[in-house]
Amino acid sequence: MMTQVKAGDKVRIHYDGTLADGSTFDSSTGRDPLEFTVGSGEIIPGLDKALPGMETGEKKTVEVPCTEAYGERNPEATQSVPREQVPEDIPLDVGTQLQLQTPEGQAVPVTVAEVTEEKVVLDANHPLAGKDLTFSIELVEIV
């Protein structure tokens, strides 16, 4: 009898993550399988809950709505900074990922969303926020 995955099991999976337009945003192809404990919150909820009941070697495709992935986009997570306050050596191409420090010293990843002569708009939403994701997964092993 094949063992089925249950919450608390440590598993290894191979996966391909694609967006609605079919473009791949993440994949384990060419890398070691992703290892994590099922049901522990180490991966996005929509993927986590697809694993219980799977058997070693099984493959499946999982549609994950944004609410079970990286959440909806939060319009309040963008902030406009006067351009003269941005140090000269910081690249300001739209799409550039930067790290800001909060007053508490926490690192916050942001993406340059807009640049004008007066201001720079930084977006602290996860790059995949608001996006529905599709994962093709293969259960490599239950560790």
Image (spheres, grey):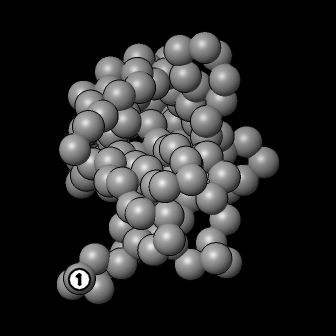
Residue 108 placement, left or right of 120: left
Q: Amino acid at mark 1?
A: Pro
Answer whether residue 16 is visible to the viewer in this image: no
Q: Nearer the viewer, residue 18 or 28?
A: 18
Q: Which residue is mark 1?
A: 103
Instruction: Using residue 111 as the reference point, say whether residue 92 is left or right of it.
Output: right
Structural crowding at the residue carrying mark 1, measured as other residues with C-alpha within 10 Å and reported as few (<14), some (14–19) or many (≥20): few
> Which of the pair 141/40 is nearer the observer?
40
Q: Secondary structure at mark 1?
A: loop
Rendered view: 14 above or below 77: above
Q: Is residue 76 above or below residue 82?
A: above
Tell me residue 83's x, y (percent). Answer: 50, 64
Q: Which residue is drawn at the image coordinates 66% and 65% (left, top)?
A: 91
Residue farthest to the front? 118
At horizontal 23% and vertical 82% (from top left) the residue drawn is 103
Q: Is residue 27 left or right of residue 47?
A: right
Where is 102 relative to 26, above or below? below
Q: Residue 2 placed where, x, y %? A: 43, 31
Whether residue 23 is visible here, answered yes or no, is yes
**Callout count:** 1
Tell which of 139 and 128 is nearer to you: 128
Q: Residue furthest top?
A: 21
Residue 23: percent from the left, percent from the top?
66, 23
Q: Which residue occupies 61% across, 40% down?
A: 26
Instruction: Please identify the quadrant where the N terminus is shown.
Output: top left
The residue depicted at 37 percent of the width and 36 percent of the height is 129
Percent across and percent down for residue 86 are 51, 72
